Amino acid sequence: MPDLEWDRTWYENTGKWRLFNPSLEIPHVCSKEPEAEPPKMVLCPKCNALTRKPMTADKLQAHIKNEHLGFY
């Protein structure tokens, strides 16, 4: 791992911290991509509270139409 230090001059100019490699005189660039966040899980308000199971938020509307309002 290269010797990295926080770039104070960048922080003073932009208000954001970044890592700086003083031996190469370039800012550090992370090669790792951010992880995707898991989908939001919700409970159907119309199902029985003892038997309902979590589902993704985008499937809730279709579930209510098919299971509770009679749309097929």
Image (cartoon, rainbow, N blue to C red):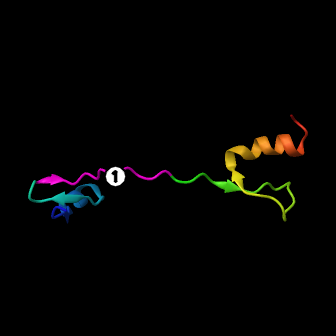
| Furthest residue toward left | 23
Q: Secondary structure at mark 1?
A: loop
Task: State the quadrant of the N terminus.
Answer: bottom left
| Furthest residue toward right | 70
Q: Quadrant of residue 13?
A: bottom left
Residue at (52, 53) in percent of width and height: 37
Whole-percent x, y for residue 66 in the image: 84, 40
Whole-percent x, y for residue 60 in the image: 75, 47
In the rendered structure, the answer to whether residue 68 lies left or right of residue 62 reads right
Location of mark 1 (residue): 32
- Amino acid of disc 1: Lys
Whole-percent x, y for residue 53 in the image: 76, 58
Task: State the quadrant of the C terminus.
Answer: top right
Q: Quadrant of residue 45?
A: bottom right
Residue 53 painted magenta: no
The residue closer to the viewer here, 4 or 6, is 4
Residue at (67, 55) in percent of width and height: 41
Residue at (81, 59) in percent of width and height: 52
Tag count: 1
Residue at (76, 43) in percent of width and height: 61
Whole-percent x, y for residue 59 in the image: 72, 44
In the rendered structure, the answer to whether residue 61 lies left or right of residue 11 reads right
Q: Quadrant of residue 54?
A: bottom right
Sort mark 1 into few (<14), some (14-19) or many (20+) by Cα contacts within 10 Å: few
The residue closer to the viewer here, 18 or 38, is 38
In the rendered structure, the answer to whether residue 31 lies left or right of residue 22 reads right
Compared to residue 33, the image places residue 23 above or below, namely: below
- Provide the major secondary structure of the magenta segment: loop
Range of magenta residues: 25-36
Residue 26 painted magenta: yes
